[in-house]
Image (spheres, rainbow, N blue to C red):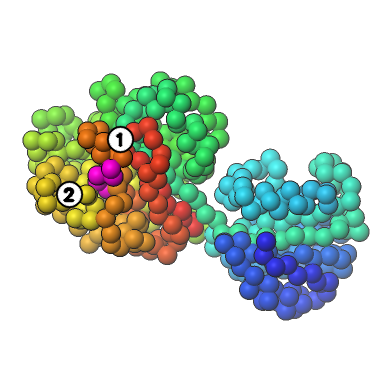
Amino acid sequence: MSTSLGVSPSPRLHSWRRVLPPLARSHRGGELLLGIVGNFQHLPLAPHGAVHGEPHAVVFTAAWHLGGAVFAGIDSVLVRCFAAEQAVGFVRQARNERDDFHVLGIGIQRLIHFNLPNFKFPRICIISYFNKKSTSWVAIKTLSTKDILSIVIYWYTLEMRLISWNINGLRAVHNKGLFLPFIKKEKPDILCLQETKAEQGQAEIDLPEYEEYWNSAKKKGYSGTAIFTKVKPVSISLGFPEKITKKYKLAVDGYGNPNEEGRVVTTEFDSPAGGFFLVNCYTPNAKGDLSRLNLRHKQWDPAFLAYVKELDAKKPVIFCGDLNVAHTEDDLAHPKENEGDHGFTKEERGGIDNIIKAGFVDTFRHFTPKGKGHYTWWSNWSNARARNVGWRIDYFFVSKRLVSKVKKAEILPAVMGSDHCPVSITIEI
């Protein structure tokens, strides 16, 4: 655990300013233990309309002073009450199970949420205070400040973990008993699936903590995308807007209209930092005989880029999915042998070049600029996965202005069930 410091606060606000700077140096792993503070009886409560003697008011006022004095990034305060003997357990939970409360709205039954006005940055201050009496909410309301033993203040960055996976048939993976254990282990805040090959409700999956948004193909058992999210979006759209579909003549294709194949789901999220769009995409395959390459090169890729640029003009964009192309020679095991084949034509690779020129960043290559062996798809033939003879065709791209907020980009090759493996990013929102 990070180093802690005990202080006896003065009712004068400048004392908070003197206390916090040395505490800030104990930052570790995104968590900052600001300190253990006692003797709150003398805190000034009146300026914020609080009732003297109520612990909630004490905590609220302390957070106000802390945020206003040093950290203008605090936008919210989460308060949890517990007895002194529970302290060790809570600290362990705070370090090991941050997903329980590191996103607004999660774990709200255990935490009281106070909004602090005028703070716009994506931070949360979690304040937990020990008391001598009962942990029930009724008893807490009657406590006076003399019953508070101490207050522990944690500083967290709001992070979300996003995972994208071409699951190649959700029902098949679920029936193998692989899907729910994957969710339990990886704990995504948002999960984007491609090639679901199902409609919502066809697979009996019990994930009550997630909202589900599906875009299924009109053709049964084909294609399809879905987003599972713990955080409810403010808007959802399926497919491309009609004006883009018409402009790029997507309906003119021998295989059918790709906009009716369930290939795009877009969700919009708000956050203190301004929010973002998340686009989940399953790009059409050019086919082994390249019979759909013309659609891919002249219609789909330009339409998709126009769409995400249009979104990017409103809010930053994260888009992910199976883009059905290895961008560079580092992104497949045998580039020379596959040059010109579907998934590695100059036209398809040029589509990714255009995405990058438009200001979007391949998050995995941001952290791992060079190097082979990082693959997300393997053929079912010749024991390719065991020999790691694969392709990297699954991506997370972000708007350039989000790059500094992406803390990690990973490939998860150990996750089985599909011919693809999941990819993920951890991002500060």
Q: Is residue 207 magenta?
A: no
Name the image quarter holding residue 364.
Answer: bottom left
Residue at which label 1 appears: 419
Magenta portion: prevailing SS class: loop
Q: Position of residue 348 (x, y in %)?
A: 15, 48
Taking the image as shown, residue 84 lies to the left or right of residue 332, namely right
Taking the image as shown, residue 408 lies to the left or right of residue 124, namely left
**CA neighbours of label 1 inside 10 A, class few (<14), some (14 to 19), many (20+):** some
Kind of residue at badge 2: His
Q: Position of residue 183 (x, y in %)?
A: 49, 36
Q: Residue at coordinates 57% horizontally, 61% vertically from top-left?
A: 30
Q: Which mark is residue 240?
A: none
Q: CA–CA distance between discs 1 and 2?
A: 18 Å
State the extent of the magenta-drawn residues as a range.
387-392
Q: Residue at coordinates 29% horizontally, 52% vertically from top-left?
A: 373
Taking the image as shown, residue 67 lies to the left or right of residue 354, namely right
Residue at which label 2 appears: 334
Quadrant of the snapshot with the N terminus:
bottom right
Q: Specify whether residue 323 is in view.
A: no
